[in-house]
Image (spheres, helix red, strand yellow):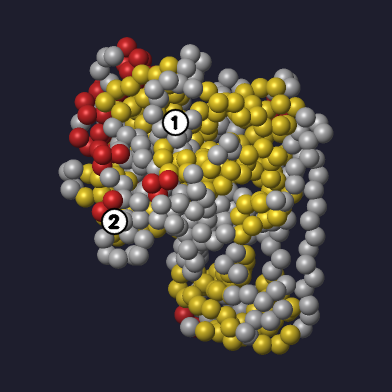
Amino acid sequence: MKKIVFFLAAIFVSSFMFSQSTFEYDVVLSPKVVPGLPGLHSYAFAQHNGKWLIIGGRKDGLHARQPFNAFPESQNNTDIYVVDIATLQFWSASLNVLPIGIREQLQATNMNFYQDGTSMYIIGGYAFSATANDHITFDKLTSIDVPNVITAIVNGTSITPYFKQISDPVFAITGGQMGKIGTTFYLVGGHRFDGRYNPMNNPTFTQTYSSQIRKFTIDNSGSQLSFANYETITDAVHLHRRDYNLVPQVFPDGELGYTISSGVFQINADLPFLYPVDIKTSGHFPQTHFNQYLSNYHSGKVGLYDQTENRMHSLFFGGMSQYYYQDGNLIQDNTVPFVKTISRVTRFSDGSLLEYQLPIEMPNLKGSGAEFIPNQNLPHYYHEVIKLSEITEDEFVIGHLYGGILSSSPSAFTDNQTNLTSADPSIYEIKLVKNPLLSSPTIDGRNPFAMQVNPNPTSGDTIQIQFTMPYQTTINYMVSTLDGKIIEEGEIEDGIIGKNTMAFELNKAKGQMVIITFIFDHKYYISQKVIRK
């Protein structure tokens, strides 16, 4: 369906950039070597008393483009590792001693996981299953007794008693993230992917994006694992995301929650989403007024809250990004290459967001699929946001970055040279050092487009939409229902610089309230709810 625009009214004046000193710490990376520890990426982790528990992930680099060569079973991580970062040693145990359902899932990649006290929960993940004789997304929820598994691996005793598992189709998700608010677990985004990867979309696989937040409680108290109070929030426009960063947050009013940072892929373009989505107990809230440019794929990340200034800082370490700096210029590369960037997004007391390029970079093109393992000796909230204002030292370790994908070329995937990538064994100690004179470049992430619907509320099927364009570009639109389903999508033609006014038909809405979303330049989103009388 095509809709035609008409009538020039005014010219949009572009916004300006601004900056301020908001984070008075240098970020310092120091390599640590654990002899013999292999490289891994896209794994799951938990920790207890300074020891890390590392499960799943892959031992090779970025997956190949050829279906027959993508995600080979031989490169699954079939061992569980315990790492003592203080003594720089590790221990391992084979997954093969576990029941087949557990060992198949726990060698998967991109599992969804969360540590709740001494229990670790793992959901889904993607790998070859001998049982299914195919690559699948596992429909499993597994609980792990973290302290006892660590002790058993270190002592060389049986790990079998410390795992429980159940199956349900709602857990068949890979590439999402898990969180917890209060007593409720949140399984956010991701997709179900079964079969062989194929970059040409030939029928070697089936794929279904979750486009949901799946909420539930878990009972791990008895011998049988169970879940209850299951409910979903569906939003096919804003939650159509995978391989993103879910960053724990403290919001300006003190509420604890999460923010979805970027992720892939947009419905109408093979490009990352740039705007974040906040998740609270009251729902999800797309922050389309702000774009985050310097971190677009899953990488190491950490949240730090300064209660004194009421500022929430999120740090991102390397990975892959559609945008990066080169010789002081912000470069857009739609192939989304590997980057060295370390960046920060800060949320201020008024809820506004700014992004900063840090003066330090990753040592190489690395960080994609890595994990930041926080220093739990620091004061922190239960969802791992570090309480920055309660730390009095001028220099302190906030955690470690382990693994990920190392690439010798920014464009290894695009150039079909995934042999130039590998699983990175590197560990970096991440330290903050007080520097009151620190100044970081600010990126103007504001959305320069505007849209308004009239009349609203409306009793008719035709409304007027006004939108303002600072430059000529593509315009896509989607009409979705309040329960998150897209009922219409298309393209707006002949948009002009300045103000545009058009008649927009709501024939497919059939009298119900809907949300109209305009997407400008495959980059800027604006959503407007249309209320029906």
Inspect the image, locate mark 2, and give the three-letter code of the amino acid beneath it: Pro
Residue 380 location, quadrant: top right
Pick the front one: 183 or 185? 185
Residue at label 2? 67
Residue at label 1? 425
Please tell me which residue is depicted at 74% across the width and 49% down the height of the picture: 442
The percent coordinates of residue 198 (x first, y second) are 32, 59
The percent coordinates of residue 124 (x first, y second) are 34, 43
Residue 475 location, quadrant: bottom right
Alpha carbon distance from label 2 to label 1: 26 Å
Residue density around tag 2, few if under 14, some if 14–19, many if 20 or more, within 10 Å? some
Pick the front one: 37 or 370? 37
The percent coordinates of residue 415 (x first, y second) are 44, 57
Total labels: the figure holds: 2
Q: Is residue 239 above or below residue 226?
A: below
Residue density around tag 1, few if under 14, some if 14–19, many if 20 or more, within 10 Å? many
The percent coordinates of residue 32 (x first, y second) are 53, 23
